[in-house]
Amino acid sequence: MPDFSTHPFSESTSQHRAEAPTSVGIAVLTVSDTRTQEDDASGRLIRDHLNFRGHDILSYRIVRDDAAAILDTLQAWLSDPQIQAIIINGGTGIAGRDVTYASIANLIQKPMPGFGELFRMLSWDEVGAASMLSRAIAGVSENTVIFSIPGSVNAVRLALEKLIGPELGHVVHEINKQN
């Protein structure tokens, strides 16, 4: 697999990155029927990683794997102009209780299919064919980017290090760019 962290980028991509904000307002949502704030290692990893990169964590919650609870939280965050990005972890699989994908798919006005495709491609190195079970998704809703990733610490680390972390400012820049 190619190492995208050292991939040579076009001049326009480099220029967009240079114009991108270095700090983004973020909300983090953990979807789980069992995790608490004390043992939510994935939620903590997201907050720590993005804080380290200079972003502001404006809100953090854990909700049950329940469509109404997920949507209530997301709608409140989408109405907050300070929140520019929402990172969701958990509930992206295919088990009966996994409702995150179905809950957010209809909220997304501008899908970013490449995110899920790249996440599954990169996951192949770690979990092989099981990567096809992930319904990682991303897109834009109400001028806010939403990233939804599996809840395992390894999946979160992969998404943050290879995809979300390097491009978050650039994504927000593109959303806010006036054509």
Image (spheres, rainbow, N blue to C red):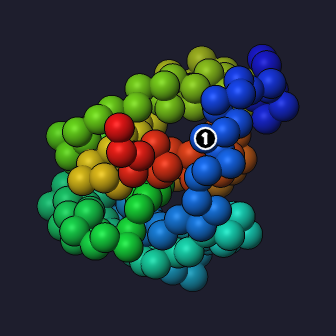
Residue 89 lies, in percent from the top left, at: 47, 54
- In the image shown, does 41 or 117 lie closer to the viewer? 117
**Quadrant housing residue 71:** bottom left
Q: Residue furthest right?
A: 6
- In the image shown, does 76 or 65 lie closer to the viewer? 76
- In the image shown, does 101 or 36 lie closer to the viewer? 101
State the residue position of label 1: 16
User: Relative to residue 28, is residue 143 drawn left or right?
Assistant: left
Q: Residue furthest front?
A: 179
Is residue 147 visible in the rendered structure shown here? no
- Using a 10 Å C-alpha cutoff, classify the residue at mark 1 as few (fewer than 14 neighbours), some (14 to 19) or many (20 or more): some
**Quadrant housing residue 144:** bottom left
Q: Determine the residue positioned at 48% across, 30% down.
A: 116
Count of numbered circles in the view? 1
Q: Determine the residue positioned at 15% across, 61% down.
A: 68
Q: Determine the residue positioned at 50% across, 32% down.
A: 115
**Quadrant housing residue 123:** top right
Instruction: Indicate the quadrant containing the C terminus: top left, top right, bottom left or bottom right.
Output: top left
User: Relative to residue 39, is residue 26 drawn left or right?
Assistant: left
Q: Tag 1: residue type?
A: His
User: Relative to residue 63, is residue 121 drawn left or right?
Assistant: right
Residue 140 lies, in percent from the top left, at: 33, 44
User: Relative to residue 99, is residue 114 drawn left or right?
Assistant: right
Residue 85 lies, in percent from the top left, at: 43, 59
